[in-house]
Every structure is written in C-alpha cells, then in structure tokens.
C-alpha cells in the first residue's frame, strides 16, 4: 500500500473522529447535530461582524429613533420567549429600501426600512423577527459555517496527503468584511426555512401575538414574488424564498396553536407613520443612485435635491449630492455635502470614504488620512485602502503605502487593479 493512500486513510479517520466527537444537541429542535462552533464562538462571530453587515446595507436608519426602539422592544419580547433567551440579542433597522431581514450567529438581527413598509401589523413584524431569531437560536448560520469548516478540513487533509498547497485559501478571507459578506449571502435550506417558520410562530404565540399573522405574511410574500415586484427578488426572497408550502405549514402551526393574541395593527401603523410620509423621498434617492451609477449626473442631482427638500434630516440624501460632485470631479464642492451627511450620521463608512477621496485629491492629506482610517474601521474596502496608500505615498511613508496597496490589491475591483499598478511602480 502506498504512503499516499495511508495518509489519505489516516486523514479520513481523523476527520470522522472529529465529526463524531463534535456532536451537539440543537437547543431549539433537540436534534443531534455537528457542533464544531461553540456558543462563545457563535456570539463572537456575530459581535465581530454585525457592524460590517450593517455597513454593507447602507447603515442604520436614524431619522426616526422611536421606530428603532419599537422594533427592538418587539424583538426582545420574542427573544425572551425563545429557546435561547440568554443570547445577547440586538435588533436594528437598516437604512435600505430593499425588503429584507437577516440574522447573524449569536442573535444579531437586522430588518430593512423597506420591509417595514410592506407589513401591516405588529404581529407581522413579530413573525419576521421570530423567524430571524430562530435562525440564530437554532444555529442555522453556525451550522452552515460548520459544514464549510468540515469540508475545508477534509479538503485540507487531502491536500496535505497529496503533497499539494492551498495558496489561494487566504484570498478568500480578505479582511473581516469578507466574513460578514459570507454570512449575509448565506442561503438557508428549505428545511431550515420551515423550521424557522414553525418555531418563530411558536415564539409569537408565547409572546402573546396572533399566529395568524405568520400566515398572512407568507401569503403576502407569495403574492409579491409571483408579481415579481421590483426589488423583492433581490432582497428577502433571495435568502428566504416564499412558497405555498410555507403558507400551508404556517396555517397548520397557527391552527395547532390557536388563532388568538395581539395583532397590533393600529400601533404598528402609528410607528411607521414617518416611514410612510417620507417614502417618496427615499424613492427619489434610490432613483438618483441608479442615475448616478448610469452616469446621468444631472438627473441624479435633481432627484437628490428633491429628496433633501422632502427630508433634510436624512444623511444618505446629502451623501448622494457629495457623490455626484465627486463623480463630476468637483471635490471641493463635494465636501460641504459630505460634512452635512456626517453631521447627521457619523457612523457610515461611505461618507468618510468619499470625504477621504475628495481631500486626497485636494492634497489635504492629514484630514484625508483621518477619514480613510474611520472608513476602514467601519468597513474595510479596496477603495479606502488604495486611497490611504496614495496618502501615505504622498507623505513619504513607503512602508505604510505598500501595506495599504497590498490590502487593496487583493480585490478584483478597479481600486484593486490600481493598487497593483502602484505596487509595480514602487517595485514592491
């Protein structure tokens, strides 16, 4: 028997032993399953990636703090009724028009402004949040990561046995943002979705909500998905595809639990009144973003002005005006808009990134560096690292410039290509 075969068999035995000894009991379903990630690690993964996940989805919605508090209160009520009430649950509303909601390990949950507008009652909100709580409580994201770890372990052991190298593995983990992106882009199995529907509805009933709202919500989702309304297939339905099967499963659960409890339609409508009133402004903003992406800066400017006039408190609208000026090459004109955006929301990476880009172009290197560092802290991106490399290079800090360029160069974006050219020019 060859040495390679012996090593492969030994690797397979080691993997099998690991999988056998790493079994755990699911805290929601009671079923035995793989347990490579501990609860402490779950919590750490969610904590370390929650902010990056929010930044990728336009940051927190802060025009109406009362709405954020309301969603958090509903969420905490459901979390207390869950099978893992001890997790450090957090609930945020994200400033994004795409109807979506997501959960990270450890109970870190987000719901988009756009999804709140599509619901009719507090009980429907409870159905969405209960569903996401189950994804966290039943370790659905963690289980996906465990499957990947097991697969990577198997591949890694096999590669060692065959004497090959996995030089590209590090490329998959470029900064913490790549981990957060992987968590957000995770797709759940049909079994996991049905599990989240069932136990989420149970949590609703325990918290005093009418389970019938879970049926109504799924019926709405099915209807909207069949109509293919703009934005929906890019949001909630990509990770939580609706189906008639889910409607019927929810109906059976509601029948089992009894159709009694709070619906909270009037309260919910009062809480989303600001969202409804300002919806046209966000529609103008979204259209302006699309126009800017297509190079129609005049149209984008008109729409951004409309949005600002309708809701001057919204930081994104001022940020769009700054982005338009940057695309036009009017860097000095962009700064007042970006400063107004940061005055309204100083914790969104894009405002600091674009301020840093404008200041680098204006050779205001110290202020550029400060904004770029803040942007990278919130969400490490290739454009921020590339521009920070330019600033360090201009200030004569060769080592720091190379460090930033090398980070940016790991990206396949235009900024990554520019960073690779800069490294070549520097002979690094």
Image (tube, rainbow, N blue to C red):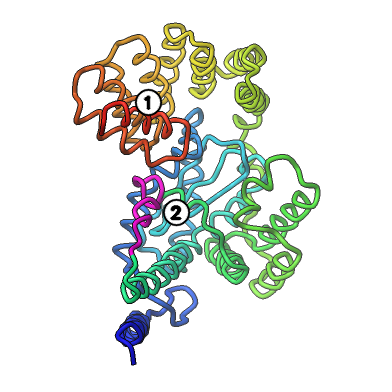
Decide: few, some or many residues near mark 2? Use Cα within 10 Å; few <14, some 14-19, many ≥20: many
Residue plotted at (39% across, 45% down): 177
Residue at image mark 1: 346
Residue plotted at (39% across, 68% down): 152
Q: Residue at the far bottom: name it.
A: 1
Residue 149: image location, x then y, percent: 39, 68
Residue 45: image location, x then y, percent: 35, 56
Q: Secondary structure at mark 2?
A: helix
Q: Nearer the viewer, mark 1 or mark 2?
A: 1
Residue plotted at (60% across, 72% down): 191
Residue 367 highlighted magenta (yes or no): no
Q: Secondary structure at mark 1?
A: loop
The span shown in magenta is 165-179
Residue 52: image location, x then y, percent: 40, 42
Kindly report the secondary structure that dominates the magenta region of the rendered protein: helix
Q: Quadrant of residue 352?
A: top left
Residue plotted at (35% across, 9% down): 362
Residue at image mark 2: 76
Q: Quadrant of residue 332?
A: top left
In terms of sequence position, does the residue under pointer 1 or pointer 2 come before the other?
2
Quarter of the image with the N terminus is: bottom left
């Amino acid at each position: 028997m060859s040495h390679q075969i012996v090593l492969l068999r030994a690797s397979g035995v080691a993997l099998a032993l690991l999988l056998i000894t790493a079994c755990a009991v699911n805290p929601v379903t009671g079923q035995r399953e793989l347990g490579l990630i501990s609860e402490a690690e779950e919590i750490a993964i969610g904590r370390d990636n929650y902010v990056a996940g929010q930044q990728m989805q336009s940051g927190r919605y802060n025009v109406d703090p009362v709405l954020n508090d309301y969603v958090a209160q509903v969420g905490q009520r459901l979390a207390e009724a869950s099978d893992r009430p001890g997790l450090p649950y957090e609930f945020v509303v994200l400033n994004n028009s795409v109807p979506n909601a997501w959960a990270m390990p450890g109970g870190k949950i987000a719901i988009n402004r756009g999804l709140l507008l599509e619901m009719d009652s507090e009980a429907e909100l409870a159905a969405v949040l209960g569903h996401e709580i189950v994804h966290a409580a039943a370790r659905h994201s963690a289980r996906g990561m465990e499957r990947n770890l097991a697969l990577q372990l198997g591949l890694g052991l096999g590669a060692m046995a065959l004497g090959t190298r996995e030089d590209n593995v590090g490329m998959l983990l470029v900064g913490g943002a790549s981990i957060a992106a992987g968590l957000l882009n995770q797709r759940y199995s049909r079994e996991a979705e049905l599990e989240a529907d069932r136990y989420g509805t149970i949590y609703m009933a325990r918290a005093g909500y009418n389970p019938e709202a879970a049926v109504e919500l799924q019926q709405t989702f099915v209807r909207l998905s069949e109509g293919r309304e703009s934005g929906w297939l890019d949001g909630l339905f990509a990770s939580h595809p609706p189906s008639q099967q889910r409607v019927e499963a929810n109906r059976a659960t509601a029948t089992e639990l009894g159709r009694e409890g709070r619906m909270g339609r009037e309260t919910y409508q009062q809480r989303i009144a600001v969202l409804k009133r300002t919806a046209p402004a966000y529609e103008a903003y979204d259209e302006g973003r699309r126009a800017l992406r297509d190079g129609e800066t005049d149209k984008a400017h008109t729409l951004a002005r409309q949005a600002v006039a309708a809701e001057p408190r919204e930081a994104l609208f001022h940020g769009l005006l700054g982005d338009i000026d940057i695309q036009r090459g009017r860097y000095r004109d962009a700064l007042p808009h970006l400063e107004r955006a940061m005055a309204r929301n100083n914790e969104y990476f894009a405002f600091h990134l674009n301020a840093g880009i404008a200041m680098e172009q204006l050779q205001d290197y110290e202020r550029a560096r400060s904004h770029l560092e803040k942007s990278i802290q919130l969400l490490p991106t290739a454009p921020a690292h590339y521009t920070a490399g330019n600033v360090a290079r201009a200030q004569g800090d060769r080592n720091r410039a190379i460090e930033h360029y090398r980070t940016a160069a790991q990206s396949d974006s235009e900024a990554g290509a520019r960073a690779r050219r800069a490294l070549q020019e520097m002979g690094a």
